[in-house]
Amino acid sequence: MVQVHPRPQAGDTVMSVAGDGPDRRAGRPGKGNGKGLGPGKGKGLGGNSVGLLGSAVIGISTVAPVYCLTSTLGPTVGQVGVQMPAVFLAGFLPMLLVAFAYRELNKAVPDCGTSFTWTVQAFGPRVGWMCGWGLVIATIIVLSNLAGVATSFFYLLLGELTGSDAVAALDGNRPVHVATCLAFIAVATAISYRGMTATKGVQYALVSLQLAVLAVFAVMALVKARSGDLPASIDFSWTWLDPFAVQSFAAFTAGLSLSIFMFWGWDACLTVNEETEGSAKTPGRAALLAMAVLVGSYLVTAVAAQMFAGVGEEGTGLGNPDTAGNVFAALADPVMGAALGVLLFVAVLASAAASLQTTFLPVARTVLAMSAYEALPPSFARIHPRFRSPGRATVAAGLATGVFYAAMSFLSENVLIDTIYALGLMICFYYSITAFACAWYFRGELGRSVRDALFKGVFPVLGGVLLAAVFCKTLYDMWDPSYGSGSSVLGVGSVFVTGVGLLLVGAVLMELMRRRSPAFFRGEVLTRSTPALVVEE
């Protein structure tokens, strides 16, 4: 029988598994209840802390739409030209199909471990552990990148406000840059440490700012583009939405990889499922709502920017390689004027800072779940008694991010760049495994109705196949030394070495944990019939 203990009086909360059999922590399985994990009953997190809108806001914030647009519009145009909106739609498709898989799995097993928990229950401990590792390492990489972006735009914004080139140049001072990055990481960690209530309040303001500035930018760009006074502007054409008009398959796959990166992060809605009102249904709905907002804002902004600036390689053209890394910096004044243009810098900084803070949610909760199920050391399963947040896991994620970024920044700029390029590999890795896990988990239900066949089988498998194909194509491209920073190891591209190396590090850590926690890897702790986790004093 499931036992729910009273609120702890002092100290951290430690999670265990309660069932009808002996204590699982001793490595002996209890008798399952045949229903999987109970909805939202498990690890001591603060239940009912966020609703549908708050959950969707967290998903949007984690994606960082303004940052993604300013850093991706240029490179995407460089690959596919005016077909950029079509490629955004193409990247949205596999993410939508995988979102259906997440929704269905969450209905059955609303557990904050998401990809890790579901994949273990579908494919077993080893595949599930590596899937969890893919999520964790991808998040650590993107957290370090977001901290760097937030720092760069912080000094860029200060330079704009003060009119001082010396202030803006502080970003190029390595010790100052790294110290500021660590400060941003520390603040984001502290907010996440205080639980969902603090997180939600900050995110409403930052996401509202981002979407409002994007709306103003798009309207002003469209109005000026239609005035006919801009020599570089181009008229809208419905052919921009045709993915088959891309000049080559190689260009299409390159653009698709960028597009997939732009949507990554929406699954943060699911990792806070145990803290969400209606944990079985609300997170899945929030994920779909976040995806709809994202694809809508991406398409409107892409079309507006393309009509205003065109796709040329000079001046403000979106194809200009000199401005590709930060398109909004080039378009801010021409589109919005000097007075309002600074809002775009504020929005990019807010986007990076907001995503930095919310991206701690999925990694901390995945580590919490892995620890609670004995796949990681038990200390990471401690819950803060006041904030009801995974305090140890959050602090560990912050420390790992800070150490990783500082070490890479001082040791090798090329390795840091190549690690960021390898991010797409990790994303496709754990998303595709989760999608396949959905179809296998529900394999006995696929014949019950057309809806079950589509949403639990066909759509997830199709999404998994698409992402697996991108994974394989990216892996092939990474072998070339010209990919990423252009460096190589024994003639092999360093991005390939970095990406595959990070997965191999996960395999080594998994083997170490197998020796420490053999019960989990024997399939005795987490199975499809595992009873609910409970809180022990």
Image (cartoon, grey):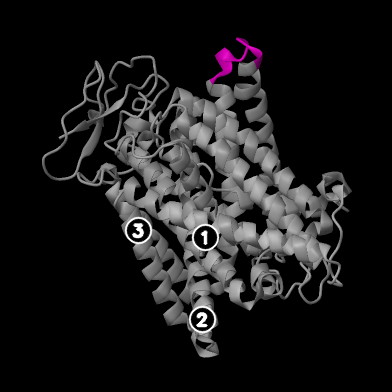
Using the image as rendered, state which of residue 67 and residue 221 is in the foreground. Answer: 221
Quarter holding residue 97: top right
Mark yes or no: residue 498 visible.
no
Element carrying mark 2: helix
N-terminal-most mark, 2 or 1? 2
Q: CA distance from mark 2 to mark 3?
A: 28 Å
Which residue is disc 2 drawn over? 161
N-terminal-most mark, 2 or 3? 2
Which residue is disc 3 drawn over? 189
Name the kind of residue labelled 1 in the image: Ser
N-terminal-most mark, 3 or 1? 3
Q: Position of residue 247 (x, y in %)?
A: 88, 53
Q: CA distance from mark 3 to mark 1?
A: 16 Å
Quarter holding residue 511: top left
Q: Nearer the viewer, mark 2 or mark 1?
A: 2
Q: Which mark is residue 351?
A: 1
- Residue 532 sits above or below residue 417 on the image: above
Badges 2 and 1: C-beta atoms under 8 Å apart? no
Residue 443 lies in the magenta-colored region: yes
Q: Position of residue 375 (x, y in %)?
A: 36, 38
Element carrying mark 1: helix
